[in-house]
Amino acid sequence: MDKMYKLILVEDDNSLGYLLSEYLGMKGFNVTWAKDASEAMLKTKTNVFDLAILDVMLPDMDGFELSQKIKAINAELPFIFLTARSLKIDVLKGFSLGAVDYLKKPIDEEELVVRINALLSRLVSDAGHEDQVSQYEIGDYVLNMDNFELNYKGKPIKLTGKEFDLLALLAKNKNQLCTHKEILTTVWDKNDYFNKKSLNVFISHLRKHLGQDPKLSIVNVSRRGFMLRVEET
């Protein structure tokens, strides 16, 4: 991570707040921890953050209302909800308010970091803050983003549009987990059972296309997603 991203974490549970702020700090993020909505509002007014992580259940205001007040201060600040509530209506409400992700407690710290990295990478890319990558080197392969072509030692390999989009996402995040949700919403624009079945088929196709380089593998991380693993030589 070249840039140290600034996060605001709003969590009233002292143990969880301390754990997450320390863990995210160890992973290279600059974390500001607020223990209630009032403190979060004050810090948002006096600091510029790249991402807000909001607990839904706060003592002075719920996270949904807080997210709208924060958006009034900084309309461009993306936010993730953390909640112990698992009702579908709450999840849908979170996304309807503009959340970029929604994680249910108990929080898996590693998954949270993966989600944050993926979201920030996508948001920065979408905003045009990074130069467009013209190609990805994947072992002995090159994925050319200009002509939508995969090459193995100079020889072109024909990919379908979905195969190319899927490989581009995995290549962009090589050696990092891409969750099922991230892949399906990015490549298929919809996270559902039928597209998840299609994803497994496309992963099999890509494994065959990349099979000429033993340093490469697409790893299935059980019930979480896939990772394009590239062994360094």
Image (cartoon, rainbow, N blue to C red):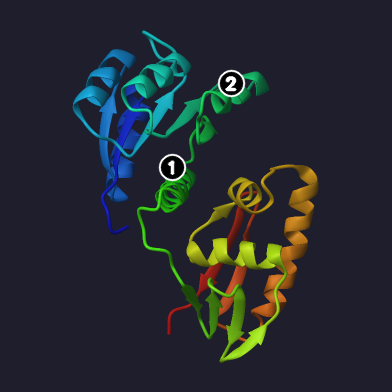
Q: Residue at x 58, y 48 (%)?
A: 182
Which one is nearer the viewer's eye here, 231 or 53?
53
Q: Quadrant of residue 213?
A: bottom right
Which one is nearer the viewer's eye here, 176 or 137?
137
Q: Residue at x 73, y 64 (%)?
A: 202
Where residue 38 appears, as percent x and y from the top left, is 28, 13
Q: Amino acid at mark 1?
A: Glu
Give the left or right position of residue 55, taking residue 202 as reference.
left
- Element type at mark 1: helix
Cα separation, mark 1 vs mark 2, equals 24 Å
Q: Which mark is residue 41?
A: none
Q: Amino acid at mark 2?
A: Lys
Can residue 92 be seen by looking at this rendering? yes
Give the left or right position of residue 129, taking residue 160 as reference.
left
Q: Which mark is residue 109?
A: 1
Q: Quadrant of the N terminus?
A: bottom left
- Element type at mark 2: helix
Q: Which residue is mark 2?
A: 93
Count of number-bearing discs: 2
Q: Quadrant of the C terminus?
A: bottom left
Can residue 219 be seen by looking at this rendering? no
Q: Residue at x 45, y 42 (%)?
A: 112
Which one is nearer the viewer's eye here, 13 or 156?
156
Where residue 107 appears, as percent x and y from the top left, is 48, 35
Mark sitting earlier along the chain (1/2) = 2
Q: Is residue 199 above or below residue 23?
A: below
1 vs 2, front mark: 2
Q: Quadrant of residue 72?
A: top left
Neighbor class of circle 1 (other Cα within 10 Å; few <14, some 14-19, many 20+) is few
Q: Residue furthest left?
A: 46
